Amino acid sequence: MHIKKQRLLTPGPTPLLPRALHAMMASDIHHRTQDFIRLYPTVLADLKEVFGTQGDVLITVSSGTGALEASVSNFFSEGDKVIICSAGKFGERWVDLAKAFRLNGVVLKAEYGDVVTPDRVKRAFAENPDAKGLLFQASETSTGAAHDVQAFGEICKGTDALCIVDAITGLGTMPLDIDGWGLDIIVGGSQKAFMIPPGLAFLSVSAKAWARAETATLPRLYFDLKKEKKMADKGESAWTPNVSHILALAEALKYIKEIGMDKLVENAQLLARATRTAATTLGLELFAPNSPSSSVTAIKAPAGMDSGEIVKGFRNHFGSIIANGQGTMKGQIFRIAHLGYFDFADLFAMVAELELVLHSKGVPVEFGKGVAAVQKIYAEAALKA
Ligand SMILES: *Cc1c(COP(=O)(O)O)cnc(C)c1O
């Protein structure tokens, strides 16, 4: 019997920032008292600073999908045409949402592991000049691929369409110039790079989007963003918030501001690059080699092996939790996250574990080869600093 610490290496939930976790204990404050009204505007202001926008940033008490729903129900009317880029399970969620709210979705599909190119989006707008929105993932968490957010934003700029980005694993893992690139709605989630438990989602809303909200007629109540904004301006939330999460978020945002959002992004990028190098050094193949995201790396299981065996190996031998593929990718790939509170030591451990798990399955592995590749990257990139 050996001690096995649980290590979360999944793209949501992610490892929790200890001081954010401790802050959750102080949740015995009422949300309609001065104690809360002192706290909430600070959190909103810090969130806006970390997002890096002059627009509004609002909080919904929900998982990420709640905010995705809000970004549909608040800005469209029945029958509106929207262009949807679908490159994985989360792209399919946009398709489902558009269907549920009776939008007319024009779907640009990419094979799993691939992305929709800006050229295809441009062509879709040329063929559908009446499109009222473009919906896509910044980082498609199910495949580990990233879209060209800047190019998509620029395409929307000259049109009537709102650029709506599921950046739930994009925020904190890639540069996102919300105002400069013309991103009208950016959605984030607490359990990703924000280092706190699931239960909150965030949305930035541009002036262009607010103008559209004036004429949008889809039904909404709990996720009525105009109501949310009116209450936020008074320092309150529309409904009873999960106060414990707001306290945790306050601490996490302080931490992110201390290190800098750009450094958080750099951290994810460096860890992602090192993970890709370790995987290929060990003879494994990447699932999205052409446009890899820095939030999560998807790696193919060795030929003839079910990736679930690797997931199980991590859990049973080390207590580490990695993600299997979703949908038809289940059994084909495994996914390792780098978003939020991850460091190089996590990566050294993960790669050493991977070597041992592969070895246990009879895959020939030279112990230390992957770890050395990661150490080399650390030595070159970070040791000098
Ligand atoms: C995690 C995630 C979501 C949100 O999922 P919830 O379970 O609703 O929080 C949406 N999109 C992407 C790309 C994600 O990674």
Image (spheres, rainbow, N blue to C red):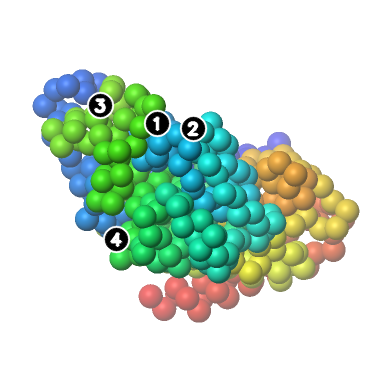
- How many C-alpha atoms fall within 10 Å of the one at disc 3: few (<14), some, or many (≥20)? many
Amino acid type assigned to the residue bearing label 3 in the image: Ala
Alpha carbon separation for disc pair 4 and 3: 26 Å
**Residue 68's spot in the image, x, y percent?**
44, 40
- Kindly report which numbered mark, 2 or 4, lies closer to the viewer in this rendering: 2
**Residue 352's spot in the image, x, y percent?**
67, 58
Q: Secondary structure at mark 1?
A: loop
- For the point 63% across and 69% down, which residue is it? 290
- How many C-alpha atoms fall within 10 Å of the one at disc 2: few (<14), some, or many (≥20)? some
Disc 4 to disc 1: CB gap under 8 Å: no
**Residue 175's spot in the image, x, y percent?**
40, 64
Amino acid type assigned to the residue bearing label 2 in the image: Phe
The residue under label 3 is 238
Alpha carbon separation for disc pair 2 and 1: 7 Å
Amino acid type assigned to the residue bearing label 1 in the image: Leu
Alpha carbon separation for disc pair 1 and 3: 19 Å
- How many C-alpha atoms fall within 10 Å of the one at disc 4: few (<14), some, or many (≥20)? some
The residue under label 1 is 218
Q: Earlier in the sequence, mark 2 or mark 1?
A: 2
The residue under label 4 is 179
Amino acid type assigned to the residue bearing label 4 in the image: Asp
- Kindly report which numbered mark, 4 or 1, lies closer to the viewer in this rendering: 1
The residue under label 2 is 101
Disc 4 to disc 3: CB gap under 8 Å: no
Is 205 situated above or below 232? below
